[in-house]
Amino acid sequence: MRAGHGVELIDVVGGEAMGGYADRTEGIAGTLDPLEVHAVTFAGGGHRFALIVADLVCVNADVVERIRAAVRDLGVDSCCVAATHTHASPESGCFPGGAPTPETLADRLLAASLQAVTAALADERDARLHATRARVADLGDRRVLPDRHAADVPVDALVVSSPEGEVRGVVVVSPVHPTVLPAGNSAASADLNGGIRRALRSGDRWVVAATGAAGDISTRHTRRGRDLAEVDRLGALVAEALPVGPPPREERDRRPAAPPPGERGRQTVLPPVSVRVELPPKPPEEFATAIASSADTRGAGERGRSVVHQGQRIARDLLTRGRTLPYEVEVQAVRLGDVTLVAVPGELFLELGEAIRAASPAHGSPVIVLGYANGYLGYLPSRGTPATYETLVSPVAEGGGERVVAAAVQAVEALGRPMAESQFAVRAGSLVDRVLTTQMPAVRRAAELVADSIAAGGVLQAFATGHSRAVALELTGRAGGLAAVSMLAVKDLVMFGGVDPELVLDPTYERAPGLAGRIYELARPDPADVFLIVSNSGINAAIVEMAELARANGHRVIALTSLEHTRSPAARTVAGPHLADLADVVIDNCAPAGDATVELAPGIHVGAVSSFTGVLIAQVLAELVCRRLLDRGADVPVFVSANLASGDGHNAALYERYHGRVRPLEP
């Protein structure tokens, strides 16, 4: 493996609004210590990953995507962008749920990130990595409690050494809010993370200080002052406790040869696994309960009452916005040699960060949890946390923190799979979980419609064009599949309608108007039939017209499509309606716009997934239909393998039963 480091300053603009404290009225007036952007690049096994850490209160998804796109042009395959969460930086859109990044700040962050990454690439050299951890006394405590109690905060470090064991740099992850400086401070500063960097720097050794699962941890009860001297005192506590030394002797002595069995990925980089997780917004009743529970501020002190009142205002603002759509965020895991880094886009409570470490089967790989990364959702409290500022302003329903933990563990598990070096394999695996998590309600509704149809003597008419035909084919005429399924396709016009084959071979033929009507007439559907129409884009003429025809003739319509592609501004412009607009039930195959999931190089995308997830959905649908028919005591017409002794006779009887309704597949 090779690793390199670079650092660049973020320009500070006088008068610019400051982030972090809701009651601030003054803009930035001077600088206590520089705001920095650090980049560390890790390359090995054919993949290069960059960790970018900026002295900002948060980074939102919009600027993260800009940075990711830009660093690809520098030869970086993937990256994570994190904020230190200093409250002495320019405001960067740090609102619960995320907000647009101010344009001028986004431009400066992008420029600084590119310069830092460029420097890191120039600095790359052979390296070994190992993780270390220390529990630091008197550094921080649970901020949600009114009084101090004993707490030794776990601080993690990723140590980068030369092959000979000389420590070249360290990435420190502290799960403590960097809020030593007070709300009245108007000077830019890295705050606690800057103090940690200064305390650990030595000679040519570089230091990156990031923030972990700090949602409920701060220096509120441990700090002795609110100035830069106190920042440096607390930073020194970390430096004294954290064993930042060379790797263990057995690690230094290990030969950098092919890894032995069970140690795949040692001292190399595995492509990150990103799991998209949907978090329901906090419902009105939760807001009301939290606001009411926080009303009694007796004994909280003047500052404590002010903070609670700020939280109540933010909670009422969120309640007024009335969000009903879930928040969708990215949880990322990446294997760097023997260490697994997990990035969470919010303020995860410490016990949840520790739960990720405890539950992650990292195959001997230490797990470090990084917060405020790849977007900003807000506070992610543990379930059952009493009403505090953090629970007031959290935008997600109770249990959202636990959902993020589950997604993080899922991402780490995917890194351990045998095909983890294939980005398609890990992304397809995460899509399976996403489909089963989000689409089962729609699949159940579709199963009810199909079961009703079959019980009434109808069949499922499955229509698709292009590669979506693979999904229709999966349902039709195969062992273990329903016999009451008829596949409709453009080729029917040749086989049964006398159309010239050369015409049908045109790949754009599905866009021609009038095709669907001719295919429908050839099929002669029964009024009891249900239509399943499969199309990843959901926009081509044959698909849309078939849905319109089915509805006009009284059939129920099930759509299996990619909602992301249909709604994407990058999709080919076609006047509506689209397939999803015409269906009784819409099942999202969760494929991205354009279908391909892996970008190998700019403009080169591979790894289409719509057929993969579509086939999964088709098989789940068929199973649920059969279960519902069994529950009703109805006959379940299922084919068996033609390669079993009883297969031909069994299947011939089913084809006879549906003669004229279901066409046998060609051999």
Image (spheres, rainbow, N blue to C red):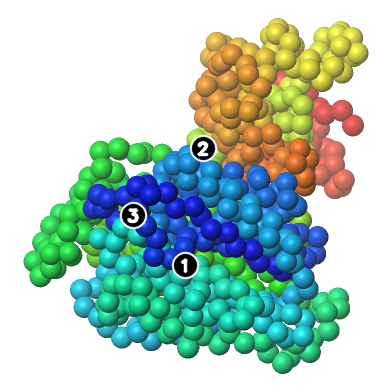
The residue mark sitting in front, 2 or 3, is 3
> Of helix, strand and loop, which one carries label 2?
helix
The residue mark sitting in front, 1 or 2, is 1
Q: Residue at x 42, y 85 (%)?
A: 237
> Of helix, strand and loop, which one carries label 3?
loop
Residue named by callout 3: 29
Q: In the rendered image of this protein, does residue 391 appear above or below residue 356?
A: above
| Other-residue count near label 3 (Cα within 10 Å), few / some / many at <14 / 14–19 / ≥20 | some
208 displayed left or right of 220: right
Q: Gap between marks 2 and 3, in whole Å?
A: 54 Å
Q: Gap between marks 1 and 3, in whole Å?
A: 25 Å
Numbered label attached to residue 442: 2
Q: In the rendered image of this protein, does residue 390 appear above or below residue 367?
A: above
Residue named by callout 1: 211
630 displayed left or right of 510: left
Q: Looking at the image, tell me whether mark 1 or mark 3 is earlier in sequence order.
A: 3
Q: Residue at x 59, y 53 (%)?
A: 113
At label 2, the amino acid type is: Ala
